[in-house]
């Protein structure tokens, strides 16, 4: 039961990461086209990176220690993007959730 709850939390964190990246990308654009362009491009790059090296079914999945490092890096870059979007409290909450998620992934060997 705990493992299932953790997997749900991990999935929600991945969705929150994509939302944070997308929000920051949207903030960077000057016109409607560039706002959506940055959002789609940045979220797409994050999805490709995650899908190649961190997805559970990927044939190029990193070993656990390297994967946790790469996941943490991607999540913390997202936290920085959220912070730069003038949402410092949300960035702090996101960072604490990242620490919980990555600690859980290490302890459960996910």
Image (cartoon, helix red, strand yellow):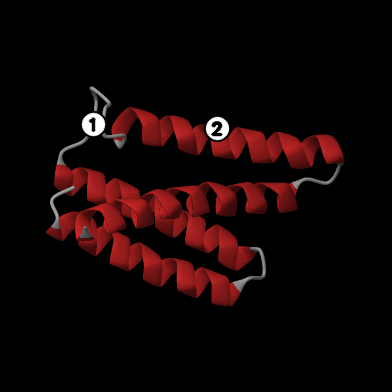
Answer few, some or many: residues within 10 Å of disc 1's Cα (few below 14, many 20 plus, some between 14 and 19). Answer: some
Is residue 38 found left or right of 52 in the rendered image?
right
Q: Position of residue 88 (x, y in %)?
A: 58, 74
Q: Position of residue 107 (x, y in %)?
A: 13, 60
Vertical arrangement, residue 106 with respect to residue 34, above or below: below
Vertical arrangement, residue 81 with respect to residue 14, above or below: below
Inter-mark Cα distance, 2 to 1:
18 Å
> On the image, numbered disc 1 is attached to which residue?
61
Who's the residue at 31% across and 67% down the image? Answer: 99
Furthest residue in direction right, as rendered: 31
Quadrant of the frame with the N terminus = bottom left
Q: Position of residue 48 (x, y in %)?
A: 44, 30
Q: Nearer the viewer, residue 14 or 34?
A: 14
Q: How many discs mark residues in the rendered view?
A: 2
Who's the residue at 56% across and 77% down the image? Answer: 89
Vertical arrangement, residue 26 with respect to residue 84, above or below: above
Q: Position of residue 27 (x, y in %)?
A: 73, 53
Who's the residue at 47% across and 73% down the image? Answer: 93
Who's the residue at 28% across and 57% down the image? Answer: 6
Q: Nearer the viewer, residue 104 or 84?
A: 104
Task: Give the structural element (helix, strand or loop) at label 1.
Answer: loop
Q: Nearer the viewer, residue 104 or 50?
A: 104
Is residue 88 found left or right of 69 in the rendered image?
right
Task: Give the structural element (helix, strand or loop) at label 2.
Answer: helix
Furthest residue in direction front, as rendered: 1
Answer few, some or many: residues within 10 Å of disc 2's Cα (few below 14, many 20 plus, some between 14 and 19). Answer: some
Vertical arrangement, residue 32 with respect to residue 87, above or below: above
Q: Which mark is residue 44?
A: 2
């Amino acid at each position: 039961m705990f493992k299932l709850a953790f997997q749900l939390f991990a999935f929600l964190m991945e969705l929150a990461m994509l939302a944070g990246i997308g929000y920051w990308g949207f903030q960077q654009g000057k016109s409607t086209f560039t706002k959506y362009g940055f959002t789609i491009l940045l979220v797409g790059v994050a999805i490709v990176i995650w899908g190649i090296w961190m997805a559970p079914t990927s044939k190029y999945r990193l070993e656990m220690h390297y994967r946790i490092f790469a996941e943490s890096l991607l999540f913390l870059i997202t936290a920085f993007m959220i912070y730069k979007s003038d949402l410092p409290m949300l960035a702090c909450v996101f960072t604490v959730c990242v620490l919980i998620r990555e600690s859980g992934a290490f302890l459960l060997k996910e």
